[in-house]
Structures are given as structure tokens and as C-alpha cells.
Amino acid sequence: MAKKHTDIADLGAVKLLDHITKAVETKQPSTVKGMGDDAAVADYNGQQCVTATSLLLEGIHFDLTYTPLKHLGYKSIIATISKVYAMNVNPTQVMVTAGLSQRFSVEHMEELFDGITTACTRYNLDLVNVALSTSLTGLTLSAAATGAAPKENIVYRNGGKPTDLLCLTGNLGAAYMGLQLLKREKTVFEGNNNAQPQMEGYHYILERHLKPEAQKEVIELLAAQHIVPTAMINVTEGLASDTLHLCKQSNCGVRIYLERLPIASETFKMAEEMNLDAVVAALHGGDDFELLFTVPVTMHDVIKRELQGIDIIGHLTGANEGAYLITPDNQAIALKAQGWK
Amino acid sequence: MAKKHTDIADLGAVKLLDHITKAVETKQPSTVKGMGDDAAVADYNGQQCVTATSLLLEGIHFDLTYTPLKHLGYKSIIATISKVYAMNVNPTQVMVTAGLSQRFSVEHMEELFDGITTACTRYNLDLVNVALSTSLTGLTLSAAATGAAPKENIVYRNGGKPTDLLCLTGNLGAAYMGLQLLKREKTVFEGNNNAQPQMEGYHYILERHLKPEAQKEVIELLAAQHIVPTAMINVTEGLASDTLHLCKQSNCGVRIYLERLPIASETFKMAEEMNLDAVVAALHGGDDFELLFTVPVTMHDVIKRELQGIDIIGHLTGANEGAYLITPDNQAIALKAQGWK
């Protein structure tokens, strides 16, 4: 073991990743894109194959006291294929490896795989590999997804240009507030086993946490309209963090207009009930599985007219202009990512 | 949670996998091979892309009290790319996701990734994605590897025919005996902190466990000799189990000749010292990362002449002739896999 010990929290996850991979170079002729995007890209005779992976760990990414195994299986697929969609590619194959501790039974695995195959049916995916392993300490779910598209259709994080419009699917912070509700009810339940969960009126935010969806229809809509975004990223860490990733890769700054952030009414209501700030949930909540993408400013009218449910929340700027959230009274607040959790 | 609970151990891992995936069908035109082989295969304009994954869990697949993190990083790559080689394909890209509990420092991650990048250099791999996550309970390492080849070069488990020769690279049981030695020394050390480990003379079996290699050179040799095996499998569960997988997929029986099993002298010596049976280690030890493949019987002389270090350990038979290990005195012992560990 090493003599000197630097806390990962002190360095931060992003810097740690930069640090340990700084010497990595790609040399294979088939490698089109290595690190730094939602997925890796390889070229096979002009067809480009996108591969993404995800890892869900019990106690970190899910809590089985309030997560049905079927939903968890579904979510493990969504967490992976959403990264392939974020390259503007339809995922077609998925692979799953599960590490299981002794407390899991055959029936538990049936539930888990019911969720996995339900997601495969909904998203038209072939489940091409499943492996099982024992685990000492709970459930581990690892998944990989692949899909292919012609070179000109693949969208990276690094193609954004100053003045490009920043567009967002769906709405933000709902999954985060759904999780807060589940955590609250767990605490209540632990204090009093006769307590009934108080979740009425919050179906939408609960579903956004427990059974999220990927943006298949948006990718199909973009294709139907022959729109290829200049840059795109999967919103999973939180809008702030993911916007900064896109800006860094595109070497741009950004202005996001606070009043344009799409937030669902249940998200606002739950935040109010819990004395939390819905905007903070929208900026930093994570697990939204929405897509953030940029298009040239000339496409403003097309986006407004043809892409229903997509909001233009801001625009890119020159890198030296910084990354800011603009309030309705025109205050500019520096956009910051949250650290290693 | 389900009402009825069937122990996974009662059903067994192989039957559980069959059970939960029995309804899975592949529908995507690009899917060439789904479940049931070392890796999945997809077709892109005639070039076929092979994708394999692996998952290493602390306490199950490795014990950090005697596994240096650098070796573990190296092994995580070997465990994944060995499955791509087992399709007769050179892996070219790898992706790694690590789940880290709080006890890991930046310096630990440097060691781990030193091993990963060392393997990438040795095997000419591009590291195209790295992701980090927190973990509650130790270290989790998930990896994926891809490679591509023309359709006619890909070798599956299911192409073996009766009378085909059964060929094996390297030797068996060494990694298993290396692991037994490490476990013994750990027990001694725990009983007496002043004890010095007694590992002299066992460098080879220790390295086979701690820093295994994949069969890159064998795949290159086969290509140079224009030999495409009829079937191939990565030997990781143990020769018995992996031979039975190949036989099942090829719908064949098998006869393996006991005296032809290649076992290294250190493996024999350690087994003797520990009152273990080296043949049992060879049949069931696991983590050998050797390749087991079949070729038509007409290639006997070519294999003997051109493929040094490869042993012909038996041959396939008709499925109704069963799977047997043949002793030197011509006794036939039914070949059996071990159960869920």
C-alpha cells in the first residue's frame, strides 16, 4: 500500500480522474473517441460503434428498502443506454453482470430480470450477455450498451460553439425530490413500524426516481427533423455539473437563464414541503436522465416549432466569458459543480 | 420482495442463468451472437465487433491483504480481454469503472491505474473510458473490452464436431495453487504478526494468481498459421466446467485423457505440500485464463509441429457418448462441473 495518503474527497472525483488518466493515449486505428464523453466510439468500415457502461452499487446508487428489484433492473438499463442516446445513437445491445450476496433468492433474480427485460422490450434492445457472481456485501449491477450509426450522426460533448443555443429535454430535479421523499418515509417507518407512507400526490417524482426513462423519442424526433446537435450530454450528475462538462469539452462559456429551468409542479411542491430549494435540486439533483444539447442559433425557430417538450434554457459564449446562471433581475451567479459525494 | 424464496445455491448458477434468461430473444439485425458465449458479437458493415465484460468484487474475486492494487488493476484487464481472445479476436479498446470505499486514497488509485495502463501497453489496448464511483463496502472493478474481426475469423463455443481434437494452451491449476499458498500465509500471519511468509520456490504459481496473462501470442500464432479453430472457450471456471460449456454449445461429448493434462511442477509441489490433489486443482481451480479450442482431427500433425506449448488433451465425441475423463488405466470418470461458489 502507498505510504502517502491523499483523501479522494480533497482532490475531487473529476481531478482524480484527470490525474490517473493524464498519460493515457489512444493508438488503435479503430478508436474514434476515448475518454471524456458519455461513451467511447470505434469505427468499423465507416459504421461507428458506441459503447457505454454503468455500475450501480447497493447503498450508493440504490436502497433496497424502498427500491423494488424490478424497478432497479429497469433503471440499470436506463442508466446505461441513456449514455448511448447522448451520443445521438440508438442503443441496440445490452449486457448485464450482477453480483449477488447470499440474501438474494431465485425469486429476487426473477424480479430483477423482469425489470431488465421490460426495459429491453420498451427500448428495442437485445440482451446479449448476462453473467452472475457471488458478492459479499449486497447487490452490484454492472451494465454495458452498444449501438451504431454513420460517422456524421454521432454527437460529442465537444462540438458546441459560442452563440449556440442550449436545449434541454424534460424537466429537472424530479428524481432528486422523489428520492428525498422516499428517504423521509424510510426514516418515519424506521421510527414507527405502524406508520403508513405519506406519498399521495407524488406519483410523478417517485416514478422519476424509481423508474426513470431514457430519451429515445427525442433522438428519433431529432433524426426525423434532420437535426444533428453540435454537442450533447446526458444529464445525470446534475445540470450544473453536466453543463460544465459540455462547456469544458467545447471550450466555451455559458449563460443559463434561471427562469427558463423546467421544473415540474410536484418537484416544487415537494421542495416546499421539505423546506428545500427546487432550483438547487434542478441544478445539482442528478439522475435526471435528460439530454442537454446545443444547436446553432439559426435553428431557434425550428426548435421552438418542431421539438415540443424541449426548452431553450440558455446559450454558449466564449470560454473567457465564464459559466453563469442569470437570475430574472439580471444577476450573474457563477455556475459550480458539486464535489465528490 | 417475493414471497417464496428459493436458494440460489439449490438451483445452481448455470440453471439460474438459464431460468432468468429463457425468454430472451434477439431481434436487432446487427446482433450476431447473444448469450451463451465468451462475448457478444455485432455486425457493422461486415466487420464484426466483439464485446466482453467482467466484474471483480472485493472479498469474492480478490483479497487486498495479499493482492497489490497494481496487480489487481492488471488482472481486471486480463479477466476481460481474455474473453475477447477466446472469440479469436484481438481486443483493441477497454473501459473501466471502479467503485471505491472511503479507505482508498488518491495514491491507491494511482497504483490501481498503473496496473491497468501497464496491461493496456502490454496488450496494445486503448483505455477509452474510466469512471469512478463511491462504494459503501470495498472495491468493485467493472471492465468492458471490444475488438473486431472479419466474420470468418470469429470462433464460437458451438462449432465443435465429434472427432475434433481438444487443444489447450499453457497449464492448469497454477493460479488456484498460488491462491491456496496466499491464503495459507495470510492465516499464519494473522496468528502471528512476526511470522515471515514462506513463499520461496513458488514464484510461478503466485504470479499465475496475482498477475495472470491473456493468450495474445496464441491468437497471433493461430492467425500466422491460418488456423481457425472450430470452437473455443476461455478457461476461467476450471477445465471441467468450461469443457462442458463448450460441449453443450457444440452438442458433443468429450474424452479428456488424464495423463495429458498439463500441470506445472510448482503446482504439483504445492499441492503435495498441502495434501491437495493437483488434478482436482487442474480440473476445477479456475482463473487459469488459458484457451481451450478444437480443430479437425486432420490438423493433428500441424498442431504438434507448429503450435509449441499447446497440448492435445482429448477429443470431442457424439453427444450421446457423454463427457468423460479417461485415466491411464482406461477408467472413464464422468466429467462434472462444480456448483455455485
Image: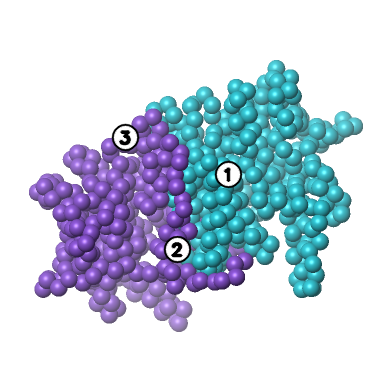
Chain colours: A cyan, B purple
Residue at 27% across / 80% down in the picture? B275
Q: Residues within 10 Å of mark 1 (few under 14, many from 20)?
A: few
Mark-to-mark CA distance, 3 and 2: 34 Å
Say what secondary structure mark 3 lies in.
strand
**Amino acid identity at mark 2:** Leu
Residue at 38% across / 41% down in the picture? B32
| Front residue of this view, candidates A148 and A244 | A148
> Mark 1 or mark 3: which is in front?
1
Assess whether mark 2 and mark 3 are in contact (beta carbons under 8 angstroms): no
Q: Position of residue A325 (x, y in %)?
A: 79, 35
Residue A222 placement: quadrant: top right
| Front residue of this view, candidates A4 and B332 | B332
Q: Is residue A36 visible?
A: no
| Front residue of this view, candidates A86 and B64 | A86
Q: Which residue is mark 2?
A: B16
- Left-right relation of B82 to B128: left
B49, above or below A177, in the image: above
Q: Which residue is mark 3?
A: B150
Chain under disc 2: B
Say what secondary structure mark 1 lies in.
helix
Q: Which residue is mark 1?
A: A122
Q: Position of residue B292 (x, y in %)?
A: 26, 55
Residue at 74% across / 40% down in the picture? A171
Mark-to-mark CA distance, 2 and 1: 24 Å
Assess whether mark 1 and mark 2 are in contact (beta carbons under 8 angstroms): no
Q: Residues within 10 Å of mark 2 (few under 14, many from 20)?
A: many
- Left-right relation of B94 to B149: right
Residue at 26% across / 55% down in the picture? B251
